[in-house]
Image (cartoon, rainbow, N blue to C red):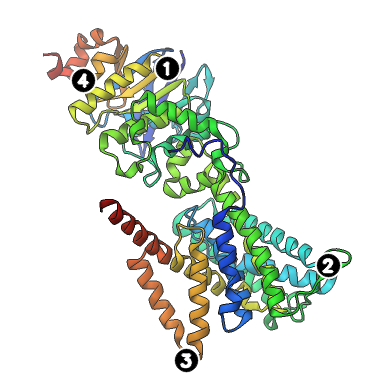
Amino acid sequence: MILRTEKLTKRFAGLKAVSTVNLQVAEGEIHAIIGPNGAGKTTLFNMLTGEIEVSAGDIYFNEKKITGLKPNQIARAGIGRSFQQNKLFQSISVLENVRLAVHAHSEGHFNPLLHFLSYTKPIEKAWKILEELDISSIADKEAGELSHGQQRMLEVAIALAAEPAVLLLDEPTSGMSPEGAFRMIRMLEKIGDRLTMVLIEHNMNLVMSISSKITVLQQGEVIATGNPSEIKNNEVVRRAYLGEYSR
Amino acid sequence: MFEAALGKKKPLVDREILILGALLMLLPMTLPYKTLAAEILIYSLGAVSFNILLGFTGLLSFGHGALFGAGAYTTGLVLIHLGWHPLIALVCASTMGAVVALFIGLLSIRKVGIYFVMLTLALNQLAFFLVYQWKGLTGGDDGLLNVPRPDFGLFPGLQLPIQTNLQFFLFAWLIFMIAIILIRRILNSPFGRVLVAIKENPDRALAVGYNVRQYKLAAFVISGFFTGLAGGLYAMFMRMVPITSVELFTSSDFIIMSLLGGLKSLYGPIIGTLIVKIASEALSQIWARWLLLLGATFVLCVLYMRGGVWGLAESFYKKRKQAEVKK
């Protein structure tokens, strides 16, 4: 398992947002986490990336315990993430947004004495990522000027900059137009060939079409895990959540 | 667009720097008093250094009076008691500025927002009372008097006096230009670009993998280094160190100068200093309450002109360019 949790729990003032979750993500998987609103999906994510503290339980990345590490340490270890709300560097260009993310993981980013353009590798790599995601045409635009869909793509580009072994995506298609969502799905499939992905998603078409494994959360607990067809046919899940979709 | 710039050598001194140097050289010729020219350079350096934090890292510090004062008293004491070379006295000032900044930074950077601001303010007050109480060393309320201004020689046989106002202006200009070249390079370095990213969105900078606190602390120390340098020049310029140099008002002066000139540009604070210093010189003779006017201008700037004078000029220039393109 490249990423797994052991009895991972988060309490907020007595309320269990995530309760003894054992998540198992194998290398190369596209693993979807689904569940109704308030099921604890984002809380689970935030614990995996170190953004909120773990109340109990442990997280293992490549069988090394990473519980309690800070977000930047976890990012450095190889777990990248995108955010549900856009948290871009708004008045900085698209290319620079990605370059900053790339340079964080290579040498010289603390150097105050050389011009940043002297470091050509981060810029070239940032450009490559933009080309891979087919958004190099907007490289000069400020992130704040982009459409919602473009901002989500940039989110993914920034997450890829760290060359993560595991990429966590929080609702990559939320608020997108159908065409935008379609483009995003195609792109995720493409990059899913070369890395492990864990995603939170409400769009069931997306979940069923691209994920290889699904974990269903309800009220902070895992109620089912399996491949898409298993989940579709799972009685508990049907009753709890999928009802409409499986009909 | 970036391919053209890639791989090309980035010289430290280019046209921009040469123009700036030439323009500043005009100061002693155009201003009524040559002392004002040197004073503008010194406060400009302080404001530019301060703006490394406010304009480029997003940290509002009220502690820069303490840093400026640290440099001024250090240079004063070194020149009075040790009689060292003026350049070494200035290096001591910068170092002391950086050390005090490290101290203030370590204590305040763990907090953000208003708590950070309040901590820097409190620490500046602490520094003031320390200087005020330690009469034996600092002269207390009277200030540190009789700071000598030894000749400036690079090697034996070449002694350049810096006694007259013009001579001292040239000396200050040289130090100022070296400092600006260094600060400009720092802001254009990978390090400097991360600072701007932190100003934009510290959470994202952390998520992307930058140690935000470490960067903020380093920015504080660098800012302190150059503010201390400005303070050192000030001690030599005044031939004394007034206790006002370490006061909170010095901190707020830097804030006003930076905001008025424009936070987003390296050169904005220089323009702000020019305006404040010339206005105070001209108006203080006509009207004793001229500070009211400065305060009002400051409020207007914050409300309606967030980019300061530099930002205004920039948007004007952009609009004209766009109009030309349309034609």
Q: Chain of mark 2?
A: B
Q: Position of residue B53 (x, y in %)?
A: 52, 56
- Tag 4 and tag 1 share a subunit: yes
Image check: B179 left or right of A149?
A: right
- Residue shown at 51% from the left, 44% from the top: B194
Label 3 sits on what residue type?
Ile
- Chain for numbered disc 1: A
Q: Secondary structure at mark 1?
A: loop
- The residue indicated by pointer 4 is A204
The Cα–Cα distance between marks 3 and 4, rounded to whole angstroms, is 75 Å
Which residue is under mark 3? B286
Residue at the spot x=63%, y=67% of the render?
A: B68
Residue that badge 1 annotates: A195
Q: Is residue B24 left or right of residue A95?
A: right
Residue B208 horizontal/vertical position (percent): 46, 35
Labels 2, 4: front one: 2
Amino acid at pointer 2:
Trp
Q: Amino acid at mark 1?
A: Leu
Up-down relation of residue B164 to residue B222 (above or below): below
Residue bearing mark 2: B84
Q: Check disc 4: other Cα within 10 Å, few if <14, some if 14-19, many if 20+.
A: few
Query: In 3D space, how far apart are the residues under numbered discs 2 and 4 (Cα atoms)?
Result: 76 Å
* Residue at the spot 52% in from the left edge and 26% down from the top edge: A77
Disc nearest the viewer among 2 and 1: 2
Is residue B42 depicted above or below A81 in this figure?
A: below
